[in-house]
Each structure stands twice: as C-alpha cells, then as structure tokens.
Image: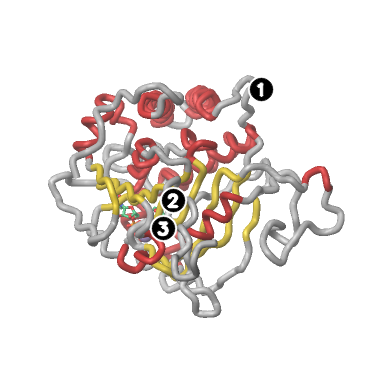
Amino acid sequence: MASASRAATPLLKDELDIVIPTIRNLDFLEMWRPFFQPYHLIIVQDGDPSKTIRVPEGFDYELYNRNDINRMLGPKASCISFKDSACRCFGYMVSKKKYIYTIDDDCFVAKDPSGKDINALEQHIKNLLSPSTPFFFNTLYDPYRDGADFVRGYPFSLREGVPTAVSHGLWLNIPDYDAPTQLVKPLERNKRYVDAILTIPKGTLFPMCGMNLAFDRELIGPAMYFGLMGDGQPIGRYDDMWAGWCTKVITDHLGLGVKTGLPYIWHSKASNPFVNLKKEYNGIFWQEELIPFFQSVSLPKDATTVQKCYLELAKQVRAKLGKVDGYFNKLADSMVTWIEAWDELNPPKGGVATANGPPKK
Ligand SMILES: O=c1ccn([C@@H]2O[C@H](COP(=O)(O)OP(=O)(O)O[C@H]3OC[C@H](O)[C@H](O)[C@H]3O)[C@@H](O)[C@H]2O)c(=O)[nH]1
Ligand SMILES: [Mn+2]
C-alpha cells in the first residue's frame, strides 16, 4: 500500500507525450506545471528556426524546428505545413508513446463551476481509457462515468462499447469560431460549462479542433495528418478539420470511438478575424463539397489498418476532389508522403527507424 505521503504516479506518465506547436515563448506552461510537469513534451517550433523559444525550467522536452524537420524527413518534409499550427502533426509522427495530448500555447487551466482547477490532461486520459458507444446513443451521456450508466432500452449486447481513439475537449472564454462568426460576434465568450462527454455516433462527422485534443496514437495516429496549410497554400486553419474528417471516417470503418465534451480549457486569445478570414475563405467555400465527399466515403473490407484506410482515402481525394481544385491533388500526394514518412519513423515493432535521429536540444 503506497504511503499517503507519496503522491500517486500520474496516469500514463510514461505512455503519453504532450505536443505543442508554437511560435512564441512557452510561459503558459507555468500554469499547467502541476498537471504537465511529470510528462514529456514535444515542442514543434514553427516559423523562423533561428528564433529561440523559451521553455520554463523543470520540463522534460524535445524541441523540433524547421531545420530539424527538413533534416529528419528530407524531401518528405514537404508534407509538413510551415507557418500554420498544422505543423503539430510532426510531433505525433516522432513521438514513441501510445498516447498524444496536443494543446495550443494560448490555452490555460480553466475552472469548473465549483472553482476547482480542471486537470484537462487527466480527464482526456480517463476519456481514452474508457470505451465509446458509437453504435447506439446513450441519452444519459457517458455511461462509464461515476454516477451514470446505460439507460433502459440500451441493448446489453452493445454495452461493452468499443475502444476510444479520440478525446475532443472544449474551451471556455474564446470559443473556436470561424472568422465570419468572430467578425459578427467579437465580444461573445463561452461561459457555459456543460458537464457531459458524448460519443459521436457512427456516420456523423464533426468539426475537430486541435486546441485541446487527445488521441490513442497506436489506434489512429497515422490518420492525424493535419494537411497542407499555411505558407504557400491556398488554405489555412482547416488543418484540424481535415484531420478530423479523415479520422472520423476511419474510426467508423475500424469500429473505434470518438468522444467530445469534457475537459474544458480556458482559451485566452482569438487571433485577428480579418487575417483568419483570408486563411479560411477557401475552406468555408470548399467544405460544402468536402462534407458530402466524406459522408459518401466507403472504405474496402481489406482496409484493415489505419495506413491502408488512409491511402485509400488519398486515392478517393484525388479522384473526387481534384476537380474541385488542383490543391486536392497536391493534398492527396501529401497524404501518401505523410504515410511513407510515418512508416519510416515508426517501423513495425523490431524494425529500425530510418530518420536522422532526434534534434540537438
Ligand atoms: O503560424 C503559426 C501560428 C500559430 N501557431 C501555434 O499554433 C497554436 C494556435 O495558434 P493561435 O492560438 O494563434 O491560433 P488561433 O487563432 O487561436 O486558432 C486556433 O484555432 C484552433 C485551431 O485548431 C488552431 O489551434 C488554431 O488555428 C499556438 O500554439 C501557436 O503558437 C503555429 O505553430 N504557427
Ligand atoms: Mn488560440
């Protein structure tokens, strides 16, 4: 029996990496120190690699800048976005852990209605370690939470649930609105704390936000490609949306679950809506074609791994979205490059990674 004085080991301490994309000093970590300090951080520095990013003392981290990405991936680095938070997916690729939590550097510790600090990481871990129920909707929300259960009429044959691949958290204060909504509602703040966790039903897509997101890297990691965004691309701020749509059709196909709801973080800064409008406008237009595409995607029975599903998806993107805009042919190519790079850095157990090793700190 561990003595009361010895703190319990944090959940998944050695099985989870925290991935942070950044263009700024990481002072925000001070507020997260009680929750994050035991975990390993993977910092993906975007923008000018010659800039020094300050990381508070006492954190265990590895930091990758654009020079590291280019050195490690060579020509395949072309699939990693530059000057967009999409670069974060490089952190997913280089991690060696089973779980990932990714958070933006303008997201802080929120308080629950009782005034207690929310340990968002702990809640994501609980979400990932308990099953999902995508095949039949439980009206009392997450049946695996303390104080809840399956309601009358819920088939017993489905109560075991399925493994959870993704845990999608939410945000108090500045909500993740698109630029037009931000422009018409500049003062709107999200003050509503909803104490619920829902499995997103099979066959339903959702707008995945990368600000406060956790996932099981071994179950769904290769699908978490955040696309070609930012510098040199006709679209931005649709990185997480693209990853979420690809992820959801694949989790549906493989019988895995996606949850949304708790935990909340406190989002402190809405970027400039005019700048965002320029980045988003193609996405706002194209998504009216993209959503019907993803809703109609069918993956073959022999697509039994995430990589096989993803490569099949890339083929369908080229065949059906290439006519929407030539960009989607480039994106389809990058989807293939991403999987090639992923498999190079993450060979099957017992294989040897072929990248050029971790960065100098
Ligand atoms: O070129 C860039 C710009 C930013 N980052 C890092 O990405 C994180 C998000 O940056 P920021 O907080 O400025 O983005 P928001 O305007 O709040 O928009 C977010 O909306 C949700 C999206 O999913 C995504 O998280 C953001 O677009 C932050 O850590 C920056 O340092 C970057 O790496 N490169
Ligand atoms: Mn932000």
Q: Nearer the viewer, residue 188 or 157?
A: 157
| Left or right, 82 with reference to 244 | left
Please give the residue where the numbered disc 2 appears in the rendered image: 101
Looking at numbered disc 1 in the image, what kind of residue is underneath it? Lys
**Proximity of marks 2 and 3: CB atoms separated by less than 8 Å:** no
Specify which label sits upstream in the sequence, 1 or 2.
Answer: 2
Looking at numbered disc 3 in the image, what kind of residue is underneath it? Ala
Does 328 sit above or below residue 111?
above
Specify which label sits upstream in the sequence, 1 or 3.
Answer: 3
* Residue furthest left in the image: 50
Label of residue 179 in the image: 3
| Left or right, 320 with reference to 352 | right
Number of numbered tags placed on the structure image: 3
| Left or right, 141 with reference to 297 | right
In terms of image quarters, where does ligand 2 lie?
bottom left
Label of residue 208 in the image: none
Specify which label sits upstream in the sequence, 2 or 3.
Answer: 2
Report if residue 81 is visible in the image. Answer: yes
